Image (cartoon, rainbow, N blue to C red):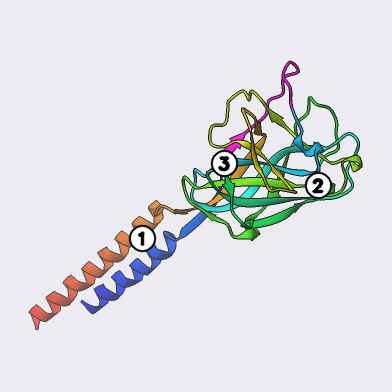
Amino acid sequence: MRSYGASAIGAMLLVGVVAADASALVLDQSNIIVLDPQLEIGGPSIDFAQSTGQTFTVGVAGRLSRVGLQIQVEEDGASADALLSIFEVDGTTLGDTALGSVPVPLADVPDFSSFASAPFVFFDVSSLGIDVSVGQMLALLVTFSGLEDDGGFFIFDSPVPSVPYEGGVEIVIGEGDGAFVVIDERDLGFQTFVEATAVVPLPASGLLLLGAVMMTAGMRRRISSRRIAAS
């Protein structure tokens, strides 16, 4: 009996290791601007008196890990990095402070090629430790520095995306007055990725091993019982 218990406990411990939690990078929200020469596309970054951003609704619980923007350096060039910040959103109000920020390095953003090219650039935000839940409203906000004459970044948006994004809106924030302004019927080209936690299913090998251990324990128990009966 003792042998059976020890075997069962060992098997349970083994199964616990095999079925440990694992994480996977999952694409959550996405709005890809597919360019059409007949439609207007915009780059709100040309105004250095305001920041530009996008609100979005979380659809996958986990840790916000990666953010992509359809962005390039303006034709006139740029002189400084920008800053990508993540905020909580309550209605039409941003949180008082950012949940975290990472730089948008000038060296990582492709130079302007044409308005027919809308490349994605991805930024790692996993170090910010932002855990998100389904239905939570957040905002991506890109803040610029310098003067308008210095040039800057062009972030692609569209008034009529091929598949309208309904989980949020494009916004601008005045750096002077902090006003939260919704840009009607426009959305940035963006993507968010979440490090989602999931339980790894027990592999077939684990089930076979568990069965073998329990069978061995049962045989030992029967042999022990026969010896007692014989004595």
Q: Secondary structure at mark 3?
A: strand
Indicate the amino acid at tag 3.
Phe
As shown in the figure, which amino acid type bears the numbered disc 1?
A: Leu
Q: Secondary structure at mark 1?
A: helix
Rendered residue at 25%/73% (across/down): 4
Give the mark, 1 or 3, whose residue is nearer the N terminus: 3
Query: In front: mark 2 or mark 3?
Result: 3
Mark 2 or mark 3: whose residue is earlier in sequence? 3
What is the distance, in whole Å, between disc 2 and disc 3 at their CAs?
A: 24 Å
Q: Residue 88 location in percent, x, y?
A: 57, 51
Instruction: Name the residue tied to disc 1.
Output: 209
Residue lying farthest top?
38
Q: Nearer the viewer, mark 1 or mark 3?
A: 3
Percent position (x, y) of residue 184?
62, 29
In the figure, residue 171 lies in which quadrant? top right
- The residue where tag 3 is placed is 56
Residue drawn where x is 81% and y is 43% of the image = 48
Q: Residues within 10 Å of mark 3 (few under 14, many from 20)?
A: many
Q: CA distance from mark 1 to mark 3?
A: 46 Å
